[in-house]
Image (cartoon, helix red, strand yellow):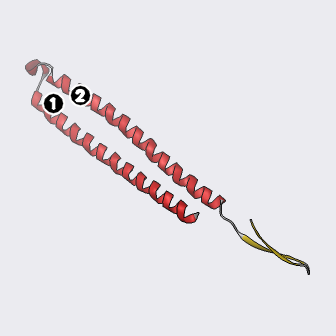
Amino acid sequence: MTARTQVDVDHINAAEAKIASAIQAVKAAVDQLNAQTRDFCGAAGSNEKNGNLQQQSQADQENKNKQYADTNEVAEKDQESARSAARQYAESEGANAAVLRDVRFEGRGHLARFE
């Protein structure tokens, strides 16, 4: 039981690490997008000269930020689920542990039992 639980916990921990890595990748992509948007807005200049390019860029950025927030929220929930599953496995392992007790009776022998 201990070996199986440890394998399950290891799989959960590996999944949690992948989720954390994915969160970092999403954050890096959003940071890169923010930088590109700033560059684009700077190149677009004022709305008077270039129509509504700057407004469109800002609207696109807001949409990307919302998508990032939604993706990040889902990833964080998945990560918390993985942590919760690991805790449950660890707790059930402790609850399922058996202890062999040697109970001695006065002059009548003894009895071994699991608790």
N-term-proximal mark, 1 vs 2: 1
Q: Is residue 80 above or below residue 68?
A: below
Q: Is residue 20 left or right of residue 110?
A: left
Q: Nearer the viewer, mark 1 or mark 2?
A: 2
Q: Amino acid at mark 1?
A: Cys
Q: Is residue 53 left or right of residue 72?
A: left
Q: At which x and y percent is residue 34?
A: 23, 37
Q: How many marks overall?
A: 2
User: Which label was assigned to residue 85?
Assistant: none
Q: At which x and y percent is residue 41?
A: 15, 30
Q: Secondary structure at mark 1?
A: helix
Residue 74: image quadrant is top left
Q: Residue at x 66, y 59 (%)?
A: 95
Who is closer to the viewer here, 46 or 36?
36
- The residue to which callout 1 is attached is 41
Image quadrant holding the N terminus, namely bottom right
Q: Are marks 1 and 2 in contact (CB under 8 Å)?
A: no
Q: Residue at x 54, y 60 (%)?
A: 5
Q: At which x and y percent is residue 82?
A: 48, 49
Q: Secondary structure at mark 2?
A: helix
Image quadrant holding the C terminus, namely bottom right
The local crowd at label 1, few if under 14, some if 14 to 19, many if 20 or more residues have their Cα within 10 Å, is: some
The local crowd at label 2, few if under 14, some if 14 to 19, many if 20 or more residues have their Cα within 10 Å, is: few
Q: CA distance from mark 1 to mark 2?
A: 11 Å
- Residue lying furthest right in this view? 107
Q: Is residue 63 left or right of residue 37?
A: right
Q: Is residue 59 above or below residue 84?
A: above
Q: Amino acid at mark 2?
A: Asp
Q: Is residue 46 above or below residue 96?
A: above
- The residue to which callout 2 is attached is 60
Q: Is residue 55 above or below residue 103?
A: above
Who is closer to the viewer here, 69 or 100?
100
